[in-house]
């Protein structure tokens, strides 16, 4: 079985994000990038499936610039078999649908039988791309995955929903699944794994190499980020002390009602 894992590059959560002076972009010079954390759970689950079957291929796939190559290699060091990077030159500002079109074309060109991705990316939090890939391929999909068990060409999966409830699905493959952090514990790359990763196959392609017209994609972009701005600073908190408790409570309630307007 060939399993495709979709990987996204995201800023480290501890990185200080700076906006350009004109508000048009994020200054990327000092930003440290990492594998989107939810994608690590996707990689781990794909590796577990291959190991249990004793055969198959796990391919790490991404759409972006050359800086992502280093992160794909980290996935190879964890145990994946091959890397695939589709260059996004000229499509750096692609929206979710455009990215999904490229990744769906990549999946078709690879003859993938199963796709894993993170349930969402920690930078934009859209939760769009994996689901869009499934729809473009007319495959079933389940997101926010907390359990996965494969039985032949059917997967029994569980997904978390609000209120602490769990939904159970039987899904016919091929299909797309979005991994949640409760799905597994990603392994660390071993030193032998890191050394082997440098010699594993790594394909660098352009959209045209997988049958996608980059010009048509660019003209078909539906949404564009027009600017960035920092959220407003929170006002300083108010402290009440040295008064009778009933008086302080009355003041707090008044502020919650008249200023915060939450009661």
Image: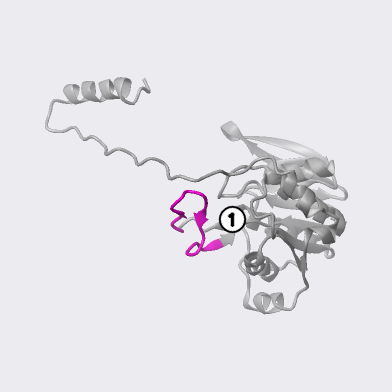
Q: Quadrant of residue 146?
A: top right
Task: Tell me which residue sits at (67%, 79%) in the image.
Answer: 195
The colour mode here is one colour
Q: Position of residue 28 (x, y in %)?
A: 51, 60
Residue nearest the viewer, comparing 115 with 29: 29
Q: Quadrant of the N terminus?
A: bottom right
Whether the magenta-drawn stretch holds residue 16 is answered as: yes
In this rendering, is residue 260 above or below 117?
above
Q: Quadrant of the C terminus?
A: top left
Residue nearest the viewer, comparing 242 with 151: 242
Query: The magenta stretch spans which residues?
Result: 15-33
In this rendering, is residue 96 above or below 77?
above
- Residue under label 1, please give it: 37
In this rendering, is residue 245 above or below 155?
above
Task: Tell me which residue sits at (61%, 42%) in the image.
Answer: 126
Q: Position of residue 153 (x, y in %)?
A: 87, 48
Q: Quadrant of residue 55?
A: bottom right
Whether the magenta-drawn stretch holds residue 218 is answered as: no
Describe the element under mark 1 as helix, strand or loop.
Answer: helix
Q: Position of residue 101 (x, y in %)?
A: 77, 48
The kind of secondary structure the magenta stretch mainly shows is loop
Residue nearest the viewer, comparing 167 with 124: 124
Res. 106 in view: yes
Task: Tell me which residue sits at (69%, 42%) in the image.
Answer: 143
């Amino acid at each position: 079985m060939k399993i495709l894992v979709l990987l996204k590059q995201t800023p480290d959560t501890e990185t200080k994000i700076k906006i350009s002076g004109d508000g048009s972009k994020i200054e990327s010079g000092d930003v440290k990038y990492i594998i989107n954390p939810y994608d690590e759970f996707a990689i781990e689950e794909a590796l577990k499936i291959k190991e249990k079957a004793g055969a198959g291929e796990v391919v790490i796939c991404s759409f972006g610039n050359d800086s992502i190559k280093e992160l794909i290699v980290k996935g190879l060091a964890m145990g994946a078999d091959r890397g695939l990077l589709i260059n996004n030159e000229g499509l750096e500002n692609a929206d979710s649908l455009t990215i999904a079109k490229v990744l769906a074309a990549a999946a078709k060109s690879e003859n993938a039988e199963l796709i894993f991705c993170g349930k969402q990316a920690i930078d934009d939090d859209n939760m769009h791309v994996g689901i869009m890939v499934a729809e473009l391929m007319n495959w079933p999909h389940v997101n926010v995955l907390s359990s996965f068990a494969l039985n032949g060409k059917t997967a029994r999966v569980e997904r978390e929903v609000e209120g602490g409830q769990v939904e159970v699905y039987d899904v016919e493959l091929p299909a797309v699944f979005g991994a949640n952090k409760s799905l597994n514990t990603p392994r660390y790359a071993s030193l032998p794994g890191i050394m082997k990763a440098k010699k594993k196959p790594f394909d660098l392609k352009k959209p045209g190499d997988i049958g996608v017209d980059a010009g048509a994609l660019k003209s078909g972009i539906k949404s564009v980020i027009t600017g960035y701005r920092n959220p407003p600073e929170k006002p300083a908190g108010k402290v009440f002390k040295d008064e009778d408790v009933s008086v302080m409570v009355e003041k707090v309630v008044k502020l919650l009602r008249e200023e915060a307007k939450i009661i």
